[in-house]
Image (tube, rainbow, N blue to C red):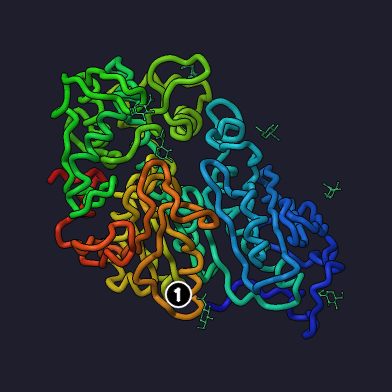
């Protein structure tokens, strides 16, 4: 794909034979860099020899501060230009309310990528960017729409346009290919490019994407609302008992007992079926009674948010997924049920527009308004749910999404729904966009199931060599620099090739269940991943 938008004067005038000398790493080299709608405030450039503390990781580090005239913002874009360059540019996505994971830059630079990330004009130095309270409101009742737009998409595009210019200026050479890589918020950002700026990247890796933002974020609040309204805090042991019982009931539905549920959509286990009985809690080896109230609440969490009129607002947690994300344990002296911090922050700052709003005000009657208001006010800004990817396809872009089926924060059913809507518009969606579902894998990482090993490499093979991925190699440790045969978290050490949806990976019936060779890809004719679709109100159709 040609980089249509950007071709700066700096490149045009660059000499043919270019030294990658770090003497090029001066702020004034980048004076011609620009992005439409921005005003650059400051550029700094300096050479770092062990960037990120990694040996032999010599980079030119460039930081650009900019504002959008009239917006009152100050955005910082961070770039790392390795002296040993692979001629690729990589934009790096964020997580939670962070627009870019700055700590990912050194590792990618060490692999040879010129890479960049943005702070979108708000603080990304916090360890876990789970709250937007320090930037969301200009004043009580007044949302900072400019910073929200930056976070949603504006700063990502600016970072990319400037990043390409910085890169080509520094090396005096054209970028061969550009890639976006992100998970969660970074996954949503990837879809933002495909939807809004299809020319920005040749390849997009959009894992566990936080798309349908105004649907899934309100749904993340549901476990808190139920517990609060029912006046009951489900104990860690009760959650553990339900989780294990669901896995026990449904693990084998796919023909292999491996501790994870692959045939999710046909797993209808009900917590109420084990209620009122004594069960052993694996957390402390004690025998506890699993209460009927806990069972009711857990069944409602699995079912997903529902109104008094029986309208199902979004998907629920998949069975086999732990509850630690959306029903976290109380800490710091707090008592009672706790909400997941990101959805709590969204609701307080962007909907109540009151940083001290008390979520305990939410009951079964007014809770549905969280989603209604969220969609009305913010779908056009951050919904990221448009399935019309024709421009991205026409530009020759390629995209891969993978999503854990035990994602404890973002419901994978939403990604499946999205993909099928893209397919409605572009029947040959597989020609440019493929998805892979990872049984037993959590949000971006973690869990007992096999996790994609190097999906960016798979994407590159597709973009650069035309090798469309039939499968995504996965292994049950996240970082493969260690011992793959290690037993992780009590799960079995294994490899599996994840299949391109709508195919699923099926055990052949013989062979070592830990070996990838014991599985084949098959069309999902038994509905393992066939979740309900949505009606004209965006609610889940009852089946
Ligand atoms: C620009 O950045 C340089 C290097 O970080 C810094 O020393 C200088 O104070 C900055 N200037 C302005 C106007 O922010
Ligand atoms: C950013 O967050 C860190 C960690 O929470 C904090 O120490 C720092 O003061 C914050 N910076 C700004 C400018 O708000
Ligand atoms: C990089 O520096 C070298 C000299 O060190 C120079 O010849 C080359 O033109 C510079 N490249 C750019 C893009 O300025
Ligand atoms: C529970 O019992 C098992 C087997 O007896 C033991 O391995 C494990 O350490 C115990 N766990 C706890 C938390 O006591
Ligand atoms: C903000 O929320 C707090 C806690 O719920 C409440 O006491 C206060 O009245 C709210 N402010 C406004 C302006 O609604
Ligand atoms: C919950 O699941 C995630 C993903 O599988 C995992 O990373 C995390 O450690 C689990 N938490 C607990 C408390 O089991
Ligand atoms: C593309 O194909 C060439 C030749 O087979 C190979 O060397 C290279 O590694 C491939 N690139 C990717 C990204 O797979």
Residue at mark 1 = 462
Q: Residue at x 32, y 30 (%)?
A: 222
Residue projecting furthest to the bottom: 16
Query: Residue 406 appears at what percent x and percent y?
Result: 34, 45
Query: Residue 323 appears at what percent x and percent y?
Result: 35, 33
For residue 375, say whether it is visible: no
Q: Nearer the viewer, residue 541 or 24?
A: 24
Q: Residue at x 63, y 65 (%)?
A: 111
Q: Secondary structure at mark 1?
A: helix
Query: Residue 233 appears at what percent x and percent y?
Result: 33, 18
Q: Is residue 386 left or right of residue 28?
A: left
Q: In the rendered view, would you say 417 is above or below 543?
A: below
Q: Is residue 177 left or right of residue 502?
A: right
Number of numbered discs visible in the structure rendering: 1
Q: Is residue 443 left or right of residue 279?
A: right
Q: Nearer the viewer, residue 279 or 101?
A: 279
Q: Residue at x 49, y 31 (%)?
A: 345
Using a 10 Å C-alpha cutoff, classify the residue at mark 1 as few (fewer than 14 neighbours), some (14 to 19) or many (20 or more): some
Q: In the rendered view, would you say 365 is above or below 530?
A: above
Q: Residue at x 47, y 35 (%)?
A: 342
Q: In the rendered view, would you say 271 is above or below 123?
A: above
Q: Quadrant of residue 500?
A: bottom left
For residue 433, say whether it is visible: yes
Query: Residue 69 appears at what percent x and percent y?
Result: 69, 50
Mark 1 vs ligand 7: CB below 8 Å: no
């Amino acid at each position: 794909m040609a980089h249509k938008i950007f071709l700066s004067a700096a490149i045009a005038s660059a000499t043919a034979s270019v030294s990658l000398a770090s003497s090029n790493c001066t702020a004034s080299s980048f004076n011609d860099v620009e992005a439409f709608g921005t005003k650059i405030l400051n550029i700094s450039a300096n050479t770092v020899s062990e960037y990120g503390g990694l040996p032999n990781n010599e980079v030119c580090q460039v930081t650009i501060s900019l504002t959008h005239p009239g917006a009152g913002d100050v955005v910082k874009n961070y770039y790392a230009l390795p002296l040993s360059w692979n001629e690729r540019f990589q934009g790096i996505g964020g997580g939670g309310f962070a627009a870019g994971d700055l700590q990912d830059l050194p590792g990618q630079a060490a692999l040879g990528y010129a890479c960049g990330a943005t702070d979108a004009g708000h603080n990304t130095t916090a360890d876990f960017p789970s709250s937007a309270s320090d930037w969301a409101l200009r004043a009580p009742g007044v949302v900072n729409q400019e910073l929200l737009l930056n976070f949603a998409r504006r700063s990502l595009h600016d970072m990319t346009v400037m990043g390409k210019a910085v890169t080509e200026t520094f090396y005096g050479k054209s970028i061969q290919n550009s890639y976006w890589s992100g998970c969660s918020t970074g996954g949503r950002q990837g879809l933002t490019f495909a939807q809004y700026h299809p020319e920005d990247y040749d390849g997009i890796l959009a894992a566990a994407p936080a798309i349908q933002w105004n649907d899934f974020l309100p749904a993340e609040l549901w476990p808190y609302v139920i517990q609060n309204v029912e006046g009951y805090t489900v104990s860690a042991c009760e959650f553990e008992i339900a989780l294990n019982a669901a896995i026990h009931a449904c693990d084998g539905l796919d023909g292999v007992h491996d501790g994870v549920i692959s045939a999710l959509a046909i797993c209808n286990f009900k917590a109420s079926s084990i209620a009122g009985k004594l069960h052993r809690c694996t957390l402390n080896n004690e025998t506890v009674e699993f209460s009927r109230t806990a069972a009711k609440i857990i069944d409602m969490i699995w079912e997903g948010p529902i109104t008094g009129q029986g309208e199902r607002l979004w998907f629920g947690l998949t069975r086999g997924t732990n509850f630690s994300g959306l029903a976290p344990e109380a800490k710091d002296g707090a008592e009672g049920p706790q909400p997941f911090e990101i959805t709590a922050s969204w609701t307080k700052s962007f909907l109540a527009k009151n940083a001290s709003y008390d979520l305990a005000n939410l009951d079964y009657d007014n809770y549905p308004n969280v989603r209604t208001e969220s969609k009305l006010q913010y779908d056009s800004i951050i919904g990221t749910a448009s399935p019309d990817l024709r421009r991205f396809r026409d530009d020759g872009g390629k995209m891969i999404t993978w999503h854990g089926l035990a994602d404890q924060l973002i419901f994978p059913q939403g990604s499946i729904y999205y993909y099928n809507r893209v397919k409605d518009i572009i029947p040959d969606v597989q020609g440019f966009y493929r998805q892979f579902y990872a049984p037993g894998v959590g949000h971006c990482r973690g869990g007992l199931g096999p996790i994609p090993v190097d999906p960016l490499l798979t994407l590159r093979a597709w973009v650069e060599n035309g090798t469309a991925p039939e499968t995504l190699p996965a292994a049950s440790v996240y970082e493969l620099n260690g011992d793959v045969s290690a037993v992780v978290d009590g799960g079995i050490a294994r490899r599996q090739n994840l299949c391109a949806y709508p195919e699923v990976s099926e055990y052949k019936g013989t062979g070592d269940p830990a070996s990838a060779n014991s599985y084949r890809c098959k069309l999902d004719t038994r509905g393992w991943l066939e979740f309900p679709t949505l009606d004209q109100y965006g609610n889940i159709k009852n089946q």
